[in-house]
Image: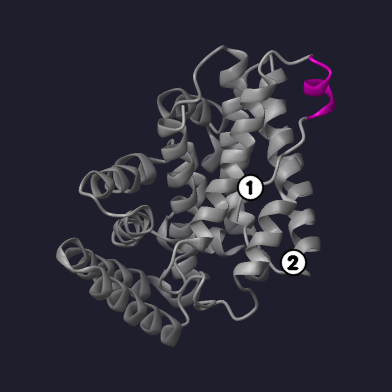
Amino acid sequence: MPVKNISLSTQAQNGTLSSPRKMEKFNNWIIESMLTEVGCTPKPGLVDLYNSGSHHDMNYNTFVKSTYSLESTFEKCIFAGFKHDKKLSDLFPKLQEIGLEGEEKMYKATGGINTQKGLIFSMAIIAAAGGYALRQDLLLKVKNIIPLVKRITRGLVARNFSGIKNKCSSELTAGEKAFIKYNMPGIRGEVEAGFPSVCNISLPTLNKFIEKGFGFNDSLLASLLALMSQVKDTTIISRGGRDSLDWMHNYAAAIYSEYITAGSKTRTDLLKQMNAMFVARNLSPGGCADLLAVTVLFYFLEEKL
C-alpha cells in the first residue's frame, strides 16, 4: 500500500523550518517501514498478509489503521527534536507525552486493540533523534541517529525500573516482570544501548541477503529469523516463560541455517510450518517484529538518501 502524503506541521508549512521536505520524507519512511514490516509474509506467530498468527484479535487491516493513525505522532516527535535546544536527555519527558497521545490514537483506530505500543516507543525516539540531527545539519544516517538515541535515553532503564520490586504483582507490566525475574530490560534496554540487535544482527543480515540476490521480502524474513535466534524477546517471555525463549532461539537458528540454501518454495513452507508451531504454543515474537520495523527504517535511511 503506498504511503499517503503526510502534511507538515504549521510551522513547517509557514517556512519556519529549514528542512521541511526532509522532515516530511523522514516521517513517510517511518510509516512505510511499519507497513513494510506487517506486510512481510509469512512471519511465524505474527500478523501478516496470510493470517493473524497468534493474535486472534487483530489482522493486517488492523495494523494499517493503527499505523496511519500515528502519522501526526511521529511528525510531532520529529519537530520536538528539531526545536530542542537543551540537554537531549531533557527531551524524553516530552516524547513520553507525545507517545501517550499516540497510544490513544492507536486504541481509537483499532477499537481498543494494542497493535504497536512498543513500536511507538522506539519510533518516537528515533523520530526525535532524526529531528535533532536535521537541526544540527546532519544527514539522516544511522551513524548520526544512534548516538542521539543513546543521549535521549541515557539512564532510562535505571529510572524506569527503580522501585518496581515494591509494586504489587498485579500492577507490574510484562516488561517489568521480565526484568525482575530474568533481569531482562527489554525494549528499554535495547533503545538505551542504541539498538544493538538491529545494528549488529538484523541490518547486516538484511544487507547480506540482498547482496546475495534475495528479494526484499525474503531478506526481511531472514533478518527476522536472525533476530528470533538471539533477541531476548519479552513478548515471548510473557506468553510462555524462559523455556519458550530458549525454544524460539534454537528453532529460529535451525530454520535460518536451512533458509540460506533453500529454494523459494521450501523457504515459504519452512516458515508456514514454523507459524503453525508458534500458533500451537500461542507464542508471538512481537519484540522481534518491532525491531524488524526499525531495521527497515534504518535500511531506508541508508539507501534512500
Q: Amino acid at mark 1?
A: Val
For the point 36% across and 83% down, the residue is 277
* Residue 148 x/y as whole percent: 51, 25
Residue on which disc 2 sits:
110
Q: Quadrant of residue 246?
A: bottom left
Q: Amino acid at mark 2?
A: Thr
Secondary structure of residue under mark 1: loop
Which mark's residue is nearer the viewer, 2 or 1? 1
Q: Is residue 87 visible?
A: yes
**Residue 273 circle label:** none
Q: Residues within 10 Å of mark 1 (few under 14, many from 20)?
A: few
Question: Magenta span has 12?
Answer: yes
Q: Return the residue found at the far left.
A: 261
Residue 3 — which label?
A: 1
User: Percent position (x, y) of residue 213?
Assistant: 23, 50
Residue 149 is a magenta residue = no
**How many numbered marks, from 0 up?**
2
Q: Is residue 106 left or right of residue 155?
A: right
| Magenta stretch bounds | 9-15
> Which type of secondary structure does the marked residue at label 2 adopt?
helix
Q: Quadrant of residue 82?
A: top right
> As drawn, is 71 to the left or to the right of 155?
right
- Which numbered disc flags the more N-terminal residue, 2 or 1? 1
State the CA–CA distance, disc 2 to disc 1: 19 Å
Please rate how many residues cluster around mark 2, counting C-alpha atoms within 10 Å: few if below 14, some from 14 to 19, many from 20: many
